[in-house]
Image (cartoon, rainbow, N blue to C red):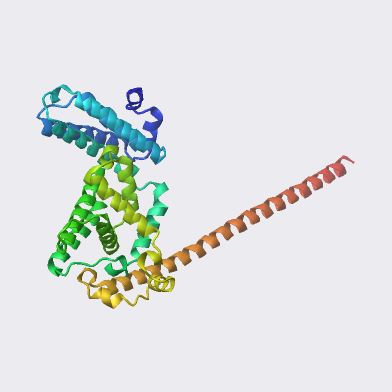
Amino acid sequence: MDFFRSGLSPSPSNRRRAVEENENSQEEENTDNQDRNQFSYYFMLRTGKVLDLNIAQQTKNFIFRVRGSKEDISIRSKEVQMFYTYMTKKIKHFPHFEGWKQDSIDDVVVGMERFVMVNIYANVFNPPSDREKNDAIDCKIRSLHWILPKHLDFTLPSDNENSDRQLALAQYYLFELNKKRSPHDKIACIVLCCKALHDLFNLAHDKAAGADELLPMLIYTIIVAAPPNLYATTQYIDRFLPPETLTSGETAYNFTNMCCALQFLENISPDKLSLSAEEFDHFMEGHSSHLEEALSNKFASGLLDNINRVKDCEDKVRQLQSYHDKLRDNTEQLQVDITKHKAEVHKSLADMRAKFSFLEEEMAKLLNS
């Protein structure tokens, strides 16, 4: 608890770092005051009471602290979780909550957590330590566009209109993931996506979908939708959603399925798709003989045009990369040449000074003789 009493008021070094990241420190301070007032207003709407200014100020100070932090993401995650625990206890013992039901108190706690994360989102989502792997997985998912349900050992219901609707709904929630900023809102999108896939499964079966049925449908939906920053999103949820949310229940079950689907796609191999290595490599190179079959599926209409556009873009990216590499090599060579030339100039000047010094000494000797 002493950590928060001492840490909630930002240290001078943290304050300086935060100010350096903003062109106008006064504008940043106004934003922080607005954040505090927004939280107070939210609290008043939920409870009908005026929020204790100490709680609002501590929340504002913590947001300011994280925005200015340069600590590793794992340390910032622990600090956020500690702040959740501290503020949850403080809110639950707040006098205004006497006689309130636990669900109502939990709503306000979730509101506090959501408020904090929305305000520090830009500082903690997809940190540098995640970016390389996140980009690699995004690229891997896009390269699997040729995969069909049969490769994952499941079939889509024959009721095209309703199955189209449910699959489109699942894809919609995957797209929404990248738009949300709160871990609570992101995990809600995952739950709704899985619910849509459960409903899709129920169109052709009398039983509920288990993990063995849900996972391949989720994998296929991810491939078709190809939502950006999926790995970064799962890491963000894992780090900043309160741990008890992911330990049991529907939310934990669906999040586990999402992580399993992502791991499957990251480590996909021919044997997992019942394909030979030659077939797998052939498809990955873009020569899939199943493209025509995929195009007959409403979910993949226009796929060939999109693939061609992607290939064109990839060619242009490769050309730009090649140009960039050449420019970098030329720049490095130029720097080497400049350094070498400077050394030669300095040597020449040193030689000239030595010669002039010798001449001056000889002239001085002649004059004195």
Q: Is residue 28 visible?
A: yes
97 with respect to 21 (left or right): left
Residue 176: where, in percent of width, then height? 22, 54
Seen from the viewer's position, the closer of residues 255 and 335 is 255
| Quarter of the image that includes the C terminus | top right
User: Where 182 falls versus 311 (above or below)?
Assistant: above
Query: Can you tell which quarter of the image residue 89 is in?
Result: top left
Q: Do we see residue 64 in this rendering? A: no
- Most extreme residue toward the left is 48
**Total marks placed:** 0
Report the residue at 17% width, 57% height from top.
Answer: 207
Query: In the shown orientation, is residue 97 left or right of residue 331?
Result: left
Q: Residue furthest right?
A: 369
Residue at image location 18% in from the left, 34% down from the top: 106
Q: Nearer the viewer, residue 277 or 48?
A: 277
Q: Position of residue 64 (x, y in %)?
A: 31, 34
Q: Nearer the viewer, residue 335 or 10?
A: 10
- Residue at figure coordinates x 51%, y 60% from the top left: 328
Q: Position of residue 250 (x, y in %)?
A: 22, 46
Give the quarter of the figure containing the N terminus. top left
Position of 72 relative to 134 (above/below)? above
Quarter holding residue 364: top right
* Residue 264 drawn at (x, y percent): 36, 58
